[in-house]
Amino acid sequence: MIEEGKAAPLFTLTDGKGAKVALKDLRGKNVIVYFYPKDDTPGCTKEACGFRDLHKSIEKTGTVVLGISPDGAESHTKFTTKYKLPFTLLSDPDKKVMEKYGAWGEKMMYGKKTTGVIRSTVWIGPDGKVVKHWRRVPKAADHPAKVLEVLTAGS
């Protein structure tokens, strides 16, 4: 489970072009890892476009943004192209990284318990430790601005 102040679990996942992206290679930078259920769905699109619209401001804090969902490379490529997303989307089809980060499990959806992706975000500091963990993101559209606010205050 993710704990603030503890080392973030390492991972290597594939991006939309088939390239491997390893968390360890981003040491020395702030990293925002946001977990989302599905490409090109209403809430996920609002969240991704929010990170897109704030990307220059987020970059100014020395931060890299990574989005992770179970979707495959082709889906990520279409989503990135359609919305001109300037950050990397990674595929976690077997949900192993999501499980390590507490982003896969039981949740309420339309009043029913279901198992799936829990919309959440982790800020990993330059030292590889978790700075902040948003365990459940209630409003996808508002979340990127909240992340930027915390990054700006903390940098």
Image: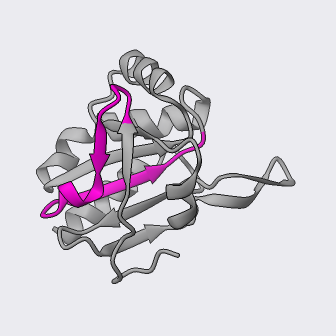
Is residue 13 on the magenta stretch?
no
- Residue 65's x, y, as percent? 30, 47
Instruction: In the displayed orientation, state which residue is furthest to the bottom.
Output: 5
Residue 145 x %, y %: 36, 50
In the rendered image, residue 147, in percent from the top left (x then y), is placed at 35, 57
Expressed as whole percent of the image width and height from the top left, the position of residue 23 reads 28, 57
Q: Name the image quarter holding residue 27.
A: bottom left
Seen at 58% across and 51% down, the residue is 95
Nearer-the-camera pick, 3 or 13:
13
Does the segment drawn in magenta span residue 27? yes
Q: In this view, does 69 lie above or below 124?
A: above
Say which residue appears at 44% left-offset and 80% top-offset: 3
**Image mark count:** 0
Rendered-image quadrant of the C terminus: bottom left
Q: Does residue 107 appear left or right of residue 48 in this picture? A: right
Rendered view: 2 above or below 81: below
Colour style of the rendered protein structure: one colour
Q: Residue at x 54, y 45 (%)?
A: 36
- Residue at image position (41%, 16%) is 82
In the image, 115 versus 82, the foreground residue is: 115
Q: Give the range drawn in magenta.
A: 15-37
Where is 122 relative to 5, above or below? above
Residue furthest right as drawn:
112
